[in-house]
Image: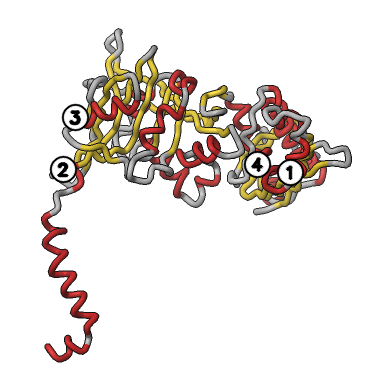
Amino acid sequence: MLKYLWKNKFLILILILIVTMCPITISLPEQSRTESIITAVGVDKKEDEYEVSIQYVVPQSSGGQENLKISKQKGKTVGEVFEKLNLELGKTLGFAHCRFIAFNEEAGKDSLTKILDYLLRQKTNTNNIVLILTKESAGDLLATANGIDSDLYTFLSNSSNSNEFKEYNDLTTIGDFFRSYFGEGNSLAIYIVNTEKTAGEEGGASPTGGESSASSGSSGSSSTDSAGGETKEQIDNKERIAIIKDGKLLLSLDEEQSNDFVWFNEDVKRIIFQVNDYQDDRLGKVDTMVNIFKRFVRKKAYFDENGNPHMELNIKNYIRTSQIIADSLEQEDYEISQDHFKEDFLKKVEEEAIKKVKKAEQHFKENNYDAIECYETFYKFKNKQLKEYLKTHSKDDFIKQVTFHYNFTFVQGS
């Protein structure tokens, strides 16, 4: 045996590493004993102070389950508040497992760099933490996520990891924010997730506010209103987006504006929209839900002979019908409506799509924000001509000066 080991010196090296490293590894304390495992952060700006809420894991010995607790502190800066939370919990804050950072409108209008600078300087990689805007209170939003399988965490997990659901959403991370902030672009879109109160079931209410805890598996927090009834906080996600420009919140889009804007996003592969008042030979006038289940967007930037910038978008869409809204349908209608469309119906779909992108174009030109990477596309592919153009034109108004062209192709699919 010894002769065999001596001939295989690589095995000797492995044995030496095992003997020297195992005692050290075994003696190391558990991560949760020395570090607070943060899953989410909420930042609210109230007058001249920041109120920061952190949601962190509290391991439970029985059944191997985990609770999520919330602690919050106030201070003049976000970094100051994080240090207060370090002292309160008696542990360092660990952001390696942090899923999202939510902030309210007042905090966003101040400056996101003031919120994110502390996190960017941590040893752990925080670039993949998702950014979320909430209208009222970021702390209240955290309170709805009582467990790691709550609605909010499920939405984030599916939108980031699920092969199907992530194609509906394009979540913005800290890394995306700083690439935009320090890059050639100065605008980006982030998701808005709000909270809403709903009537809960009868029963005892659980306290909220200050520091709270909740068992894993619940999808919202409950409290008692002034009338004695129980209300329940839950997430209100209408897939709205907000625009960040120069590191600050510029404006929030409503639901229709958000749905129009998403057509410019190359990473969103699935879109569902409605085509109204289509005149069908068999059914008469009907409304139809159209499901784009796969799409490809190609952008082409160029300058014309007069030196004016143009952006051409070629968008290929694979479609099927999700629903035909009619008083009655026969078997033949179900057989043909999924993937065999008449030319006039495809023309109607194209008209509706063009209407949506032109409304989005009008909005971002009127409000002067470039969250579609228009300037970056010219900078990358037409750099020399762009520099010449900017000698006589303003970069800040570049998106207003670009002429857009849209070429849609709709392919029938099943």
Residue for point 34% across, 31% down = 41
Q: Circle 1 sits on which residue?
A: 313
Furthest residue to the bottom?
Answer: 3
Q: In what element is the residue under mark 1?
A: strand
Residue type for callout 1: Leu
Residue type for callout 3: Leu
What separation in Å lies between label 1 and label 2 (alpha carbons)?
A: 53 Å
Q: Circle 4 sits on which residue?
A: 376
Q: Earlier in the sequence, mark 1 or mark 2?
A: 2
Q: Circle 2 sits on which residue?
A: 33
Q: Circle 3 sits on which residue?
A: 87
Q: Are marks 3 and 2 in contact (CB under 8 Å)?
A: no
Residue 400: percent from the left, percent from the top? 73, 28
Nearest-to-viewer mark from 2 and 4: 4
Residue for point 66% across, 50% down = 296
Nearest-to-viewer mark from 3 and 1: 3
Tell me which corner region of the image, top left, top right, bottom left or bottom right, holds residue 46: top left
What separation in Å lies between label 2 and label 4 (alpha carbons)?
A: 46 Å
Furthest residue to the top?
Answer: 227
Q: Earlier in the sequence, mark 2 or mark 4?
A: 2
Front one among 274 and 52: 52
